[in-house]
Amino acid sequence: MRLRTTSAAILALTTLLTLPGCANSPSATPGPSSRAATRQKNTTSDAKPSEPLSSAVLRERLLDESDLGEGYTRKPETTPGRDDVTVTGCPALEQLGVDAAAGESLDFPRRAKAAFTYAGGSGSEVSEELYSDTEAKLSQGTGRIFDTMTSCPSYQVVAGSTPVDVAIQEMSAPQLGDEQWSLQMTYTVGGRTIVVQQTAIRTGTTVVLVAGSPGLVDAHVGKALAKARSTE
């Protein structure tokens, strides 16, 4: 399964490579949860459609500024991926795809995405991606990618000619939907650090992936799931 770089991961890399000072902010501080659980599966059954949703329907279910609240601005869509990123120190990621090292989105045919900046802190961003496929494909594909990304606790990404150290931490995911995955990626270069959290929730034939500053992800993943399921 091929991976694509998320807007949150690109933000982390480009911010580290361009800002003169430390990129840490209160919203980029890991929360108190420490129970490692990249994959959890609930036994409860939710009402859900039996067929995958179209990309057009997924776009209608994305969060917007009115859902997020004051201080958020939607970013224009950018071309996904980078062709100047290489990874060393993690054979599993090298085999899955070079871009995986930068923090990835999923590669399902039905998808929609949006990214927002938040005025409450330097480098604060939250992005949402929605995917739809059969339940089995979503479960297997999402689990495989999260398992691969957490298979190496640390490795190095070279973006252009600049080396970036990356550390992966498995995180406890909120008990929502049918399956949950969560991790944090810490990017460090020249003593500067950015933390990006990724939390994915599968509900039936839809996966909701929210990424960005940990505080913002925790604050909005429930909203994203509720809107994704609003007409089910």
Image (spheres, helix red, strand yellow):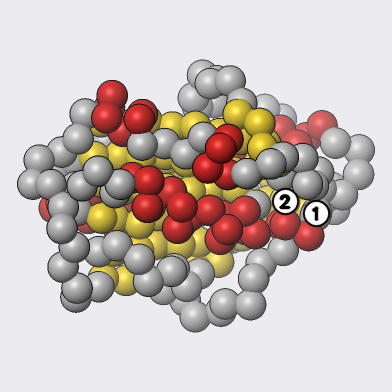
Residue farthest left in this picture: 50
Residue 33: in sight, yes or no? yes
Q: Is residue 82 above or below residue 190?
A: above
Disc number at residue 194? 2
Residue farthest bottom in this picture: 35
At which x and y percent is residue 40?
A: 32, 71
- The answer to whether the residue labelled 2 contacts the one labelled 1, judged by CB atoms less than 8 Å apart, is yes
Q: Quadrant of residue 72?
A: top right
At which x and y percent is residue 210?
A: 48, 48
- Which amino acid lies under the numbered mark 2 shown in the image of this protein? Ile
Disc number at residue 215? none
At which x and y percent is residue 230?
A: 30, 47
Disc number at residue 24? 1
At which x and y percent is residue 5?
A: 49, 35
Q: Secondary structure at mark 2?
A: strand
Asked whether, in this view, residue 95 is left or right of residue 73, the answer is: left
Distance of label 2 from label 1 (alpha carbons): 6 Å
Which comes sooner in the sequence, label 2 or label 1?
A: 1
Q: Quadrant of the N terminus?
A: top left
- Which amino acid lies under the numbered mark 1 shown in the image of this protein? Asn
Asked whether, in this view, residue 99 is left or right of residue 141, the answer is: right
Asked whether, in this view, residue 66 is left or right of residue 148, the answer is: right
Viewer-side residue, 126 vs 183: 126
Residue 7: in sight, yes or no? no
Residues packed near mark 1 inside 10 Å, few (<14), some (14 to 19) or many (20 plus): some
Viewer-side residue, 70 vs 58: 70
